[in-house]
Image (spheres, rainbow, N blue to C red):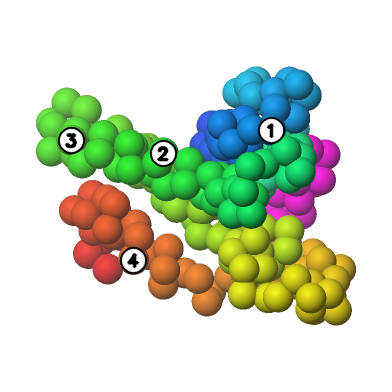
């Protein structure tokens, strides 16, 4: 792990993952469940969100086994009680709030990157802001995969009848195994989506960073 990877991880990945989790808790609060608030999780303080596996061990393993080609981390999941939510779709709204927060961060920092890109004095900072954009887009797209326990699984469950308990139980039981396998095999299949969104958000800044690719 080199200095750049350390900075990228601690300055961009961890804060982005924390914002993702806080967004889940805020959405639940707005929809009638204050579990996250009572647990003290509606805070950006990293100490409240560090997960031994997702925040520390998993990124280290990925850096070792992928030689830094793929870095991923997640914060401790924010708790919520689905029985306190008002409607049947509220649990889906809580799940999608995390990726939505990452897309919002990406949009804000993409606007900043585009704004300062042509400035002769601070144009170089556009590169740093672009890293924030690309990290948040990657986190959002990854979490939208329809694999439990990722947020996208809640969207998948809309198309699986509640009566089909066998399939739901199978997904809940083996989803994490599928996910772990993909973490080490790679996520080349979602790279075109991530690249397209990077181009959409960053425009000329992205083409400059990638040499026009």
Residue at position x 59%, y 54% from top?
89
Quick one: label 1 or label 3, which is nearer the N terminus?
Answer: 1
Mark seen at residue 196: 4
Neighbourhood count class around disc 1 (C-alpha, 10 Å): few under 14, some 14–19, many 20 upward: many
**Quick one: 206 or 42, which is closer to the camera?**
42
Q: Which residue is mark 1?
A: 33
Q: How many marks?
A: 4
Q: CA distance from mark 1 to mark 4?
A: 36 Å
Does any portion of residue 68 appear in the rendered image? no
Residue at position x 47%, y 69% from top?
191
In this view, the mark in front (1 or 4): 1
- Give above or below for 151 relative to 159: above
Q: Position of residue 76 (x, y in %)?
A: 75, 38
Q: Which residue is mark 3?
A: 115
SS type, badge 4: helix
In this view, the mark in front (3 or 2): 2
Q: Which residues are magenta?
A: 51-66
Q: Is residue 106 left or right of residue 191?
A: left
Residue at position x 73%, y 63% from top?
148
Quick one: label 1 or label 4, which is nearer the N terminus?
Answer: 1
- Give above or below for 182 relative to 102: below
Q: Quadrant of the C terminus?
A: bottom left
Q: Which residue is mark 2?
A: 105
In this view, the mark in front (1 or 3): 1
Quick one: label 4 or label 2, which is nearer the N terminus?
Answer: 2
SS type, badge 3: helix
Q: Is residue 162 magenta?
A: no
Q: Is residue 99 left or right of residue 80?
A: left
Quick one: label 4 or label 3, which is nearer the N terminus?
Answer: 3
**Quick one: 66 or 140, which is closer to the camera?**
140
Q: CA distance from mark 4 to mark 3?
A: 20 Å
Residue at position x 64%, y 54% from top?
88
């Amino acid at each position: 792990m080199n200095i750049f990877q350390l900075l990228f991880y601690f300055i961009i990945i961890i804060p982005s993952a924390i914002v993702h989790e806080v967004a889940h808790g805020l959405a639940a609060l707005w929809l009638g469940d204050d579990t996250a608030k009572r647990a003290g999780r509606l805070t950006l303080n990293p100490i409240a969100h560090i997960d031994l596996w997702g925040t520390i061990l998993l990124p280290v393993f990925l850096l070792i086994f992928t030689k830094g080609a793929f870095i991923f981390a997640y914060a401790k999941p924010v708790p919520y009680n689905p029985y306190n939510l008002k409607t049947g779709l509220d649990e889906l709204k809580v799940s999608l709030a995390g990726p939505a927060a990452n897309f919002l961060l990406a949009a804000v920092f993409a606007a900043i990157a585009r704004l300062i890109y042509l400035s002769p004095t601070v144009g170089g900072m556009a590169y740093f802001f672009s890293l924030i954009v690309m990290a948040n887009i990657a986190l959002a797209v990854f979490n939208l995969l329809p694999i439990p326990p990722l947020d996208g699984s809640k969207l998948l469950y809309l198309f699986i009848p509640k009566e089909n308990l066998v399939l739901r139980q199978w997904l809940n039981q083996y989803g994490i195994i599928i996910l772990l396998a993909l973490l080490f095999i790679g996520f080349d299949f979602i790279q075109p989506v991530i690249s397209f969104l990077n181009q959409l958000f960053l425009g000329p800044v992205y083409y400059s960073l990638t040499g026009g690719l």
